[in-house]
Every structure is written in C-alpha cells, then in structure tokens.
C-alpha cells in the first residue's frame, strides 16, 4: 500500500490544471487586497465631510431583509425573531453616524437618511403588530367589553330579551368552538352533542382504516410483495400501481373532505340555555371567559379556533349594540315607559301640554319622583320652570341633588328651592355667593335661602353683610339673622337698628330681634316703639307687645307664636 495519500494520485494526470487552480487561488487574495485598497478611496470620494452613506445602506438592507422575513413568517416564533431584528436595527440606528439634512436648504424634499430609516422601521413595526395573532386574549377582551355594556346599560323589557338572545347565541357558538360543556347548563342535553363528536371522530378513523384495507387487498391480489408494490406505485409502470395511485388520490380527497367535515362539526353551535335576567347573562359570560382561558389556545396551533371565536364575539357585540336600550327611546316614549302619563284621565289627556297637567297632578298627590323624571327628560325651559316651582312649593328633599347642581351655576330659582328644602349641605355652595358687592340681586336670593335653612353656621357670614353697600342686601341680611335665631346676632342687629341710615334696614333689624324673641332681643327692639319712622315703630311695637305678653305669662320667648315668621 503506497504511503502517498490517495487524494494526490489524480494530480499526476491533471497536474497542469492543478497548478492553474493554485495560481488562481494565489491571485485571489491579491485581488481582494486590491479591492480593499480601492474601497476606502471611493468612500472618501463619496462624502466630502468625512461621513459615509455605508451605515445607512447597511441599515436599509437589514430593513429590507426584515421585511422579507416578516412576509415569510408563519408562526409567532418567526414574528418574535423579526421583532428582535427590528430592535437590533433600531439600536444600531440610534448609534449610527448618519449625515444630517442641510439646515440652510429650504427644500422640503432634502434627504434625511435617519428620518427615512425611522419611518421604514415604524412601518415594519406596525406591519409586525398586524401580523400577530389572533390571540385568545383578544376574545376575552371582546367578551369583557360586551359584558360591561350589558351591566352598565339600562335596557327596556324588549331590549333585555334581545340581549338574552344575543348572549345565548354567542354561548352556543363559543362552546361549540372550544368543545366544552358550560357549567351554567340548566337542562341542555349535552349527550347528543358528545355523541355527534364521537361519530365525527369515528368517521375520520373509518376513512383512514378503509384506505389501509384497500391497500392490503391490492397487495394480496398481486404478488404479495409489499415493497415491490410500493416501488411500482412510485414508478407508475404497472396497472396495479396506477390503481393504487388513484385510490391514494381518492383517499387524500376523502381525507380532505373529512377534515372539512370535522371543522364544520367542531364549530357547530350547541344548545345553551341560561337565565334571561342580566345577572345570569353576565355570570354566564364570565364562565365562558374562564373556559376559554382554560382552553389554553395557541396563536399558531389554534388559529382557526381563535378566529371563529372572534367572529362569534363580533356577532355578540352587534347583537348587544342592536338591542333596545332605554336611551334609544324618545323623550315621550321614556315618559310613557315609566308610566308618567298614567295619571291623566280622558278629561285632561288632550290638554296641551299633557306633561304640565301631569306635573300639577303629581304635585297635588305629593309625588316627587315623576316630577324629577320630567325635569330630567324634558328639555324645554318652560317645563323646567314648572318643575322647579313645584319642587319649591313641595319643599321636596328628593329634589335636593338636582337643585343643588343647578344652584352651583348661580341660578336663582334652584337656590330658592334649596331654601325651601332647608338642607344645610347647600351652605358650602351658598356662603361664597354673598361675598362682595358685585351682584346684589343674587345676594338677596341667597341670603333669604340661607335664612330659611336656619343653620347657626351661617350667623357670622350673614352678619358680615349688615355693612354691605346695597341697603336691600343689608335688609335681607338682617332678616336672615332673624330666621336663623342665633342670640349672637342680637348686638349687631341692635347696632343696625340704632345707626343705619335706611329705615327699611332698621325695620328689618327690629323684625329680626323680635324673631329671635329672647327678653334681651325684645328689649332692644321695643325701645323704638315711638320711632320717627312708621315702619320701624310698627316692628318695635310688635316686640313691646311680645315682651309684655311674655312678662305676664312668665315666658318672654313668645313672639314667634304670635307672629308669622315671614321675610
């Protein structure tokens, strides 16, 4: 055996060729060196400022490659790889030394390599997000949104039934798709569905088995050599092989049809029955969410299942959206739905407007809620005014919230109603309205309302208005102190009675002292029983009579029982 390696023996016949190959290989590094020496010179020539467009070209090529990979991606893993490539490109783009556009140029089309690359990168990221999914999380999110809509919406009776139908239809589709039994079932026969599924599986298995038996029978009719038949089938030279090939094609076709049948049966809706009240419907949707999450659907392997579920959620959203909500009704339909017009008889139903007649009837009945409903729904200023007047005459505590809200807009009629209601929660809103002298008309209304509420918390803020520039504001402040009845107001009221230049203000102070009704207050007012001003004298005489009656009865605080507390 020769010591010379066997791979060198052929070289004896072709040594010349071998030498030529060696020469070519020897020349190749020289050529590469020449190219290497040439490229920097060209690069230098391309950019006078020392920058090069090679980084931009490299990044652009990488983006093109990423785009190709994105188009070829078939799985989430492939998309993850594309995303990783885009992240790497973005990092390199941030570090790349790219030429900046000339700031002196006014041309909007001036080249900006960085901006172009960033725009291309952003487009690829958008395309990447679009290529992802569908995900089971999207299905769950859609169901959650529909569930929230069902819970947060007020439905009519008809609409509630329509929602129930939409939910039942969705549940039937969803559980048919994921092939699970709902745990809220209240009578649905799941046995037939299970049998149907088993029959489908059995049909598929039978088809495969029959194909195998046919193949075996063909072999038995031949020479019994299974391998020979296989070769013959591959070559297609024999009649038996052609027959087997045809049978195989038929088997494949049958198999495809079987798969289509399987998909159709797998996604066939099942019968689902659930309580038709909203709580039961939302609970059933919650159960469906849990069952879908427990199915552990994979975005790649279960794409068809997830897509079918998303189609079902779209139908659910449409069904819920189309169901009749209370807000879909017109104003009069809403009032009729709530029975607002039921109090109208044949004698007044035709009076115009019927809503006004109904409000007057409800006021006489002492029914506040129907008037609140009309106030909320009727948009005309005419009807709102009548509702507010009714609230004031009724002094309805139920109307506090809506009137307090209107009072925050400095609306006088609602402020008057707050005074009639007498809820001291309104004081935080009303006290700031009496500061300053910019709106005497509003201050008079507010002071009266504060007095009617009658909280001693208001004594000091109201007493501060006894020195207001407007005499009507001072007069109203004095009367408000009388209605509040706080004895701390006796001294400032006595000072006003003595010193104020307006007789109407002094008379209001005397009236307020009489309303407070203590002996000290009545003494302070009765001193002016012979005052030069008739209106002051009249109020002081009331105080004197009350003081005398009190002394005779042993109780000085009787003024309020003898005189109506009017402002």
Image (cartoon, grey):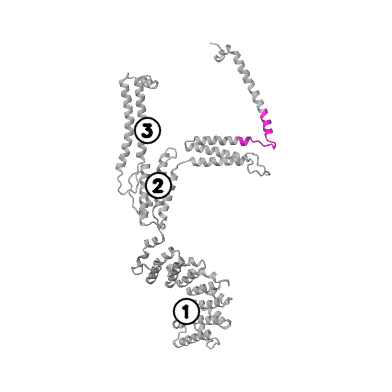
In the depicted view, which residue is nearer to us: 360 or 307? 360
Q: Residue 133 magenta-drawn? A: no
Upstream in sequence: badge 2 or badge 1? 2
At x 43%, y 45%, the residue is 139
* SS for callout 1: loop
At x 36%, y 27%, the residue is 248
Query: Crowding at label 1, few (<14), some or many (≥20) Cα neighbours within 10 Å?
Result: few
2 or 1: mark nearer the eye = 2
Q: Tell me if residue 226 can be seen.
A: no
In the depicted view, which residue is nearer to us: 444 or 359? 359
In the rendered structure, find residue 315 and report the number of the disc placed on it: 2
* SS for callout 2: helix
Question: How far is the residue under mark 2 from the one under mark 3?
Answer: 29 Å
Question: How far is the residue under mark 2 from the one under mark 1?
Answer: 65 Å
The relative height of residue 474 versus residue 150 in the rendered view (above or below) is below
* SS for callout 3: helix
Q: Residue 50 magenta-drawn? A: yes
Give the extent of the magenta segment.
37-57
Residue 16 found in image quarter: top right
Q: Which residue is mark 3?
A: 256
Q: Give coordinates of residue 173: x percent, y percent.
A: 36, 44
Query: Crowding at label 3, few (<14), some or many (≥20) Cα neighbours within 10 Å?
Result: few
Q: Give coordinates of residue 283: x percent, y percent.
A: 38, 51
The relative height of residue 465 versus residue 249 in the rendered view (above or below) is below
Q: Which residue is mark 1?
A: 566
Upstream in sequence: badge 3 or badge 1? 3
């Amino acid at each position: 055996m020769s010591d010379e390696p066997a791979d060198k023996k052929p070289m004896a016949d072709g040594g010349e060729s071998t030498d030529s190959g060696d020469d070519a290989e020897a020349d190749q590094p020289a050529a590469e060196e020449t190219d290497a020496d040439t490229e920097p010179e060209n690069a230098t020539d391309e950019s006078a400022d020392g920058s090069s467009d090679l980084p931009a070209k490299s990044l652009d090529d990488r983006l093109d490659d990423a785009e190709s990979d994105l188009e070829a991606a078939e799985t989430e893993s492939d998309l993850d790889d594309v995303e990783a490539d885009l992240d790497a490109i973005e990092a390199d783009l941030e570090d790349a030394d790219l030429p900046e556009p000339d700031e002196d140029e006014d041309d909007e089309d001036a080249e900006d390599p960085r901006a172009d690359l960033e725009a291309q990168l952003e487009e690829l990221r958008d395309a990447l997000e679009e290529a992802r999914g569908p995900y089971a999380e999207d299905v769950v999110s859609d169901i959650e949104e529909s569930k929230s809509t069902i819970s947060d919406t007020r439905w009519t009776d008809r609409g509630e039934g329509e929602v129930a139908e939409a939910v039942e239809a969705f549940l039937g589709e969803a559980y048919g798709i994921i092939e699970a039994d709902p745990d809220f079932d209240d009578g649905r026969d799941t046995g037939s569905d299970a049998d149907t599924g088993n029959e489908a599986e059995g049909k598929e298995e039978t088809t495969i088995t029959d194909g195998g038996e046919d193949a075996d029978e063909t072999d038995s009719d031949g020479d019994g050599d299974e391998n020979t038949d296989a070769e013959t089938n591959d070559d297609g030279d024999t009649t038996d092989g052609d027959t087997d090939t045809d049978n195989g094609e038929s088997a494949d076709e049958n198999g495809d049809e079987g798969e289509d049948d399987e998909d159709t049966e797998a996604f066939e809706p099942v019968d689902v029955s659930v309580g038709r009240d909203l709580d039961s419907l939302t609970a059933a949707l919650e159960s469906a969410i849990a069952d879908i999450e427990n199915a552990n659907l994979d975005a790649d392997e279960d794409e068809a299942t997830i897509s079918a579920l998303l189609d079902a959620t779209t139908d659910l959203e449409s069904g819920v959206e189309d169901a009749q909500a209370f807000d879909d009704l017109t104003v009069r339909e809403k009032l009729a739905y709530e029975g607002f017009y039921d109090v109208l008889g044949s004698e007044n139903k035709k009076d115009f407007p019927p809503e006004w007649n109904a409000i007057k009837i409800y006021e006489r009945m002492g029914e506040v809620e129907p008037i609140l409903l009309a106030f909320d729904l009727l948009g005309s200023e005419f009807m709102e005014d009548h509702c507010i007047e009714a609230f004031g005459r009724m002094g309805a505590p139920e109307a506090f919230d809506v009137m307090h809200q209107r009072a925050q807009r400095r609306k006088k009629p609602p402020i008057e109603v707050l005074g009639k209601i007498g809820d001291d929660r309104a004081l935080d809103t009303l006290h700031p309205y009496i500061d300053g002298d910019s709106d005497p008309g509003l201050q008079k209304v507010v002071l009266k309302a504060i007095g009617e509420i009658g909280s001693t918390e208001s004594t000091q803020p109201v007493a501060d208005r006894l020195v207001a520039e407007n005499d009507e504001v001072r007069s109203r402040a004095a009367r408000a102190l009388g209605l509040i009845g706080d004895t701390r107001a006796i001294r400032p009221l006595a000072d006003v009675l003595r010193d104020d230049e307006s007789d109407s203000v002094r008379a209001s102070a005397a009236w307020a002292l009489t309303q407070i009704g203590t002996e000290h207050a009545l003494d302070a007012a009765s001193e002016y029983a012979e005052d030069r001003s008739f209106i002051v004298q009249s109020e002081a005489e009331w105080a004197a009579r009350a003081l005398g009656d009190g002394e005779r009865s042993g109780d000085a605080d009787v003024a309020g029982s003898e005189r109506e507390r009017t402002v």
